[in-house]
Amino acid sequence: MTQYFDTHAHYDSGKFNADREEVLRAVHESGVALIVDPGDCAATSARAVAIAQEYDFVYAAVGWHPEEAAGWTDDSLEQIRALAAQPKVCAIGEIGLDYYWDKENHEKQIYWFERQLEVAREEKLPFIIHSRDAAKDTLDTMKRLHAGDIGGAVHCFSYGKEMAREYLDMGLYLGIGGVITFKNAKKLKEVVEYAPLSQIVLETDSPYLSPEPNRGKRNDSRNLIFVAREIAQIKGITEEEVIAVTEENAEKLLLR
């Protein structure tokens, strides 16, 4: 049976409250062997941990999303550190920088991004990075903290080939999801063509960013088939190879 690994899916989201168990069982039965559910604050991180403890095929990541930076305190960091010690927590994330909405708190975002990278280093866990409209500051922060020595993935990679090269040279992985199927995703398709398959992991970002042909609908891990299919077409290889190699990559990174 096909064995997908969804490295980024928010089943803790309220959008799954009505049918979470039904969806997760259906996802697993469809051939999705493993899932990582990343939190974006203390509350969602705790929910992700609870889901991971309930379902043997789900793991959790814990962290504070950059959009939450205005409310962070030292206690926030300690909450994440405590959650990181829980069973089945496999990463710190999603963490990073997001300047799309927040035009003012850049220094605060960078400060807490650095602190959470240090938690990942101390806990010997990889990280899951969120970066939106913050290409230079994200890369500069990661270089300054030698993030390549920690290891991790750049979730929903959205920059060009030159930026991809920087992360690949650091030994990091690129998270590729439903956006790769969009007709206007020319830049991302070029990145996927360029990047070695050995440094790509699959993700959905469920319930968001459903791929074609389900764009606009609630996303779930069953849609990984469309992501794998598009990557296979871009790279001129079989879907089976994409699925097998990306699963191996994800296990190496997240279940080490």
Image (spheres, rainbow, N blue to C red):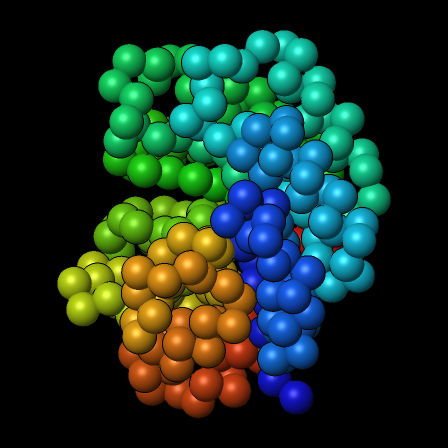
Seen in the picture, residue 7 relative to 37 is either above or below; the reply is below
The answer, for residue 136, to whether it is visible in the render is: no
Q: Position of residue 45 (x, y in %)?
A: 64, 36
Q: Position of residue 94 (x, y in %)?
A: 53, 39
Q: In this rendering, is residue 255 above or below 112? A: below
Please indicate, yes or no, whether residue 20 appears anywhere in the rendered image: yes
Res. 229 image quadrant: bottom left
Q: Nearer the viewer, residue 82 or 187?
A: 82
Task: Answer with left or right where residue 217 lies relative to residue 12.
Answer: left
Residue depicted at 44% across the width and 61% down the height: 219
Which residue: 45% across, 48% down?
154
- Which quarter shows the N terminus? bottom right
Q: Is residue 99 left or right of residue 147?
A: left
Q: Is residue 242 above or below residue 98?
A: below
In the image, what residue occupies the spot 64% across and 29% down?
43
Q: Is residue 23 above or below residue 162?
A: below
Residue at horizontal 31 percent and vertical 60 percent from the top: 216
The C terminus is located in which quarter?
A: bottom right
Of 155 and 124, nearer the camera is 155
Q: Judge from the rendering whether residue 174 lies leftward or rightward of residue 114; answer left or right.
A: left
Frontmost residue, 191 versus 78:
78
Q: Quadrant of residue 55?
A: bottom right
